[in-house]
Image: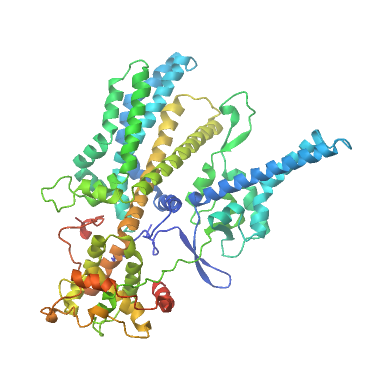
Amino acid sequence: MAAAAPLDTTIGVITPENIAFEYQLAGPFRRLPAYLIDFAVRWFVVIAVWLALAIAGGLMSFLSSFSGPLSQAFFMIGIFAINWFYGTIFEAYFNGRTIGKWMCGIRVIQVDGRPITPRSALLRNLLRVADLAPAASLSMFDPELPPQLVIPSGIVGLVTMMMTQRMQRMGDLAAGTMVIVDERKWQLPVAKVDDARVPALASFIPGDYLITRKMARTLATYAERRHFMTPPRRREVARKLTDPLIERFEFRKDIDPDLLLYSLYYKTFLADSATESPDLGPLSGYSPLAKDADKVGGLADETIREMAQSVPVVTDPAATVETVSEAKE
Amino acid sequence: MQLDQTHVAIRVRTLSEIGDLALVLLHRYPTLLLKGFVMGAAPWAIANALLLYWIPITEYQYGMDDPEARWQIVRYLIWMALLVFLQTPAAGVVTTIYLGQAVFESKPSWKSAASSARQMFGRWIRLLGFRRLAIPAMIIAGIRLFQPWNTTYDVTVPLAILFVAIVIRANRPFLPEMILLERCPERSKNSNEMTLRKRAKALHRPSGSDVGSRWVITAATLCILFAGLFYSLVWFRGIATGYWNFGLVTLLGLYPVALWTVGGLSVVVRMIAYLDTRIRLEGWDVELAVRAEAIRQFGEEVEIVSGSVAPALPVSGNRGGV
């Protein structure tokens, strides 16, 4: 039961070229919208074919016996071909994607990370009918209706996906494939520091305070997510780390915890990239240090806060893309 | 143990990912989750049997083909579905506590989960049993024991209860998790202390439409899943025994089993959705990362004594909470 990696819908794959990838698996709930879209597309095509045959049959009826049983036979063959080979053709020649999968951002690959082959695509699509079992017939609801098994329950596929590590349905197991989320790796956006108090406070953080890799990652996560939290919540979260830091840095006790954590982020990721010293404007000369507490004002003062908001952005965030991404890795 | 190295990956997820992660959890802990949910659901299932099984048994003796028998079977199906729907949060108490532990630990223990559930019995039975209408609905079903079909009691009342329950649960879907995992007091003389009411408001109100719509979509998906599962059970029984009729085995066995199975899945989905809401709204993952960093650098956590906006998730004794 114990596992080294945290439980998630991801799986590590090592390709035959010995390259390791981590894919996010698409389980049944992620695949369901794609299936419904493909279902709609298939029947749209079926209706289009039926219309085309009806028109062709109508035009040719005066020449031959194309209308009637022959056109019906073509129509039935068309339905069969579309329903059974739509997925095969798209997945084989569209890099593992059908229209539904493409719209939902998922695709099929081999379990070793290679692109799906036409043979695998055929196999997994032929076995779809088994995954949709057991199917209910229309006659269950009305004995007058034909006993066609057209209402799939999909329980076989669901149970199979639940029981396999790669969330594979029976078709996937037979074909050696899996469905993954086809998204680019998530990266942190660069936080834009537009508060002049941040570089001001960052300039007082002692130079001998070393930021570890884990601390850098924590700061990057905090800076990215703080915008989604209310100010009281930001302070509450930040205080867990900043209270002992304030003592260590010998800062005043009234320093805003959120501001201090954001300043650490600035110092870690942005300060070194700035080509010029930040223009502190009205904050020049103020100190957050406890020993300077007798001085007028400070970074926590409301008046200073208001003045600081008028100071323009002080750094070029574009220069920090690599640094932030590196920290996340 | 580092707080930011959880056993279940903590990150923002879409609703479909939440469903998939629920299946991953079921794949990882199939026996344990089944055992825990059966433990929680068994008393309720037995009570339902005592309250409702007389209906199909009586009708079976007289024959199931006449119109009156059909109405009585419909009555049984409606009441059984309603009771299971209302009882599921209370039946999932042990599972919820267990999953709370599973977030941080690779080997959570049923013993401690069951012990926590016992300690909080009075609290959750009052809030999830009475206020969420499970026990009042059972009392009404009990009053109607061995009574003939009555449209008011067997259609209007269940529909009214269902409607009220849907409104309550769609508004506060994560109350069971708050009661069992956050353990905020129900009342407090200290106005600064976070009570259950304040906490529920703080978590549900800012993302009310999102939480409500997610609940509705999840409920609709689970209804479809129930239909598929129930049909599959009937189908497998038909294949195995050759009996395809809608007899007592189906009514007394397969139907409640399908309802409780989907109920059990809903408990797992709700727990993950609760964590996801906390991550989205309160930056719970950020808090864990910051707390872990504080422990790494200074060896101990800074305790926030009062004025906490969002309590920590106290999943086991050594981690503390509010």
Q: Position of residue A127 (x, y in %)?
A: 62, 47
Quadrant into which the N terminus of chain B falls: bottom left
Work out whether B187 lies above or below A189: above
Q: Quadrant of residue B264?
A: top left
Quadrant position of residue B101: bottom left
Q: Position of residue B80 (x, y in %)?
A: 37, 29
- Is B284 located above or below residue A54 in the figure? below
Residue A52 occupies quadrant: top right
Which residue sits furthest right?
A63
Is B73 situated left or right of B129 in this image? Answer: right
Which image quarter is the C terminus of chain B in?
bottom left
- Residue nearest the observer in this picture, A174 or A258: A258
Tell me which residue sits at (57%, 40%) in the image: A133
Position of residue B263 in the picture relative to residue A116 (left or right): left
- Residue beneath the point at 64% across and 59% down: A94
Write the residue at 47% across / 40% down: B225
Front-most of A179 and B254?
A179
Coloring scheme used:
rainbow
Observer-nearest of A2 and A217: A217
How far from the left and from the top, in percent, is residue A1?
A: 38, 57
- The image shows residue B149 at horizontal and vertical percentages of 37, 17
> Is residue B296 something one can see in this rendering?
no
**Looking at the image, can residue A222 be seen?**
yes
